[in-house]
Image: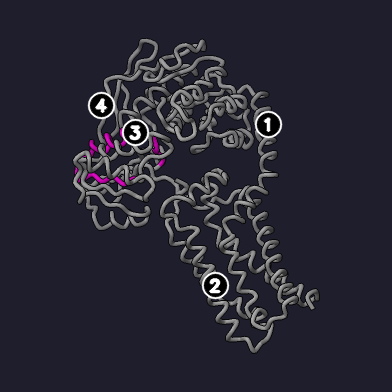
Amino acid sequence: MFISVPKTIECVLTAIAFAVMLCIAVYRQTGVLQTAGYSNKKYFKWLKKKGNLAFGRLVLLAMLCALSSAVISLCFSFAGEWSAVIGLAPFILFFAVYVVADKKTALRSEVSATPRLYRLYAVLALVCAVVSYIFVSLLNFADYVWGNGVFTCLRYCALSLLPVLLIPLLMLSNCIAKIYEVPHNKKFIKQAKVKLAASSIKVVAITGSYGKTSTKFILNGILSTKYRVLSTPRSHNTPIGIALAVNNNRLEDYDIFIAEMGARHVGDIAELCEICPPDISLITGICGQHLETFGTFQNVVKAKGEILGYTKDRAVIADDCFDLFAENPVPKIRCGCVSDIHCSPDGVGFTLTLNGESRRAHSKLLGKHSAYNIGLAAEAAFVAGMSLDEIVSAIGNLEFIEHRLQLIKANGVNILDDGYNSNVKGARAALEVLKTFGGRKIVVTPGLVELGVLEEEENALLGKDLVGFDLIILVGDTLVTAVKRGYVDGGGEEEKLIIKPNLAEAQEELKNFIQPDDTVLFLNDLPDVY
């Protein structure tokens, strides 16, 4: 009989078992989905990337499960309809093998356990269980209708289709979860907006195509010597990132809130400024970063310039992009306060001039670009009420910023961790810093992303800039062809250039090459979504 208590229990238990296996198998994929901002479109773009074997591995898993399940079921055909249940054993084995093998693939975007992830997983588990139950029920119904002995024995082999459907099920679950997430986020953001509006805290907002996060940390370090400062953590520069910083803290415990503001489309900065209108704003610089989404350079300028329309006091704008915003009526300061820059492996020294007074300053931060970032932060700190002497003293105590030309010394080797740098100007600045070190010089990079129509051209130019270093390791396959072409066309020695599929293999190559006094630059260690 098709509908019976034993058969129902069999269907339910089988569905639950498959839901558990599917959820475990897809666990690391959620790390990529998180990195993509829970965007199915961006996640799917990653899946289609040349050489991406994520879907192929699941197809292989399905084939192995189907074949082994068929063999086991036929071997136990004497058990009647229970042979199909016995044939499910290989699924457990091969799913376990898949999970172990998947852990060995080099993913830098590991899963971050957040409340949103838990909610997504709850939806995913339910979707997998329902789909699995439908599959099992349909197979049992087909067996009841056809009554064929061979089909009875092999009916559960068709469940091998579920691994192939796993990625679509994850994306479907993400869509379903957004039914709750979108209004929930809007409410959370509105709460932050109301909280900021009722507070007397001074808001300093930072935007630009590059240098936002570095300038934020530098400004935080300077202002914190005199004021109580709250800032958005890490690279959080979205409405949710700002709302998290505001809603998770007591604003009355702080004097200044530094908000980093990122954008990929016109209107993004305006949306952020609606949440926290800045008293003081900073524009760190403009380049073709994110042209993939902006479309044109003019749109980049328009988007970044939105911050000026919300600025209450003054705007501090980098010298090299000031003219792009000259017509905006908001009171502006053209930041040209840094001169006489001297760079070395020990840091950067320069003359800082504010309001006509000059002092010599030094920081352990590396590179000429760091001096300019410090200058922007110093100008903003001066507007916020700090004196020149206070600012110079604070500059001397600045610490390295994690993953942004952070110098790490290990076993006599200098490691320049510039893993969070993905823009053109930052890349060139990092290479200039590398040249200041003695010993052999090594660069590990996957290339530069989100440059739209300029991506091929800029990566070829990056390749030319790599000529002259002792070893170049290109990671991945998305952009390395353009980088290699530029390197070879620029006169680079091909025997000094190596291509590795992932960061793990690049690090293994390094172990066999590096020696004391070498300097290794990890440039743009991007998450796998790129």
Q: Position of residue 258 (x, y in %)?
A: 52, 28
247 vs 483, left or right, is right
Give the distance between the C-alpha atoms of the residues marked 1 and 2, in whole angstroms.
Answer: 49 Å
Q: Horizontal and vertical percent for residue 448?
A: 38, 40
Query: Residue 193 location, x and y as percent?
Result: 65, 28
Amino acid at the residue labelled 2? Cys
Instruction: From the image, state whether disc 1 or disc 3 is nearer to you.
Output: 1
Decide: few, some or many residues near mark 3? Use Cα within 10 Å; few <14, some 14-19, many ≥20.
many
Q: Name the amino acid, label 4.
A: His
Which labelled disc corresponds to residue 190?
Answer: 1
For the residue pair 199 and 82, the one nearer the viewer reads as 82
Instruction: Please tell me whether residue 371 is drawn above or below residue 130 in the rendered image.
Output: above
Q: CA distance from mark 4 to mark 2?
A: 63 Å
Front residue of 518 and 263: 263
> To which residue does mark 2 refer?
65
CB atoms at circles 4 and 3 under 8 Å apart? Answer: no
**Which label lies toward us, 4 or 1?**
1
Alpha carbons under labels 2 and 3: distance apart: 54 Å
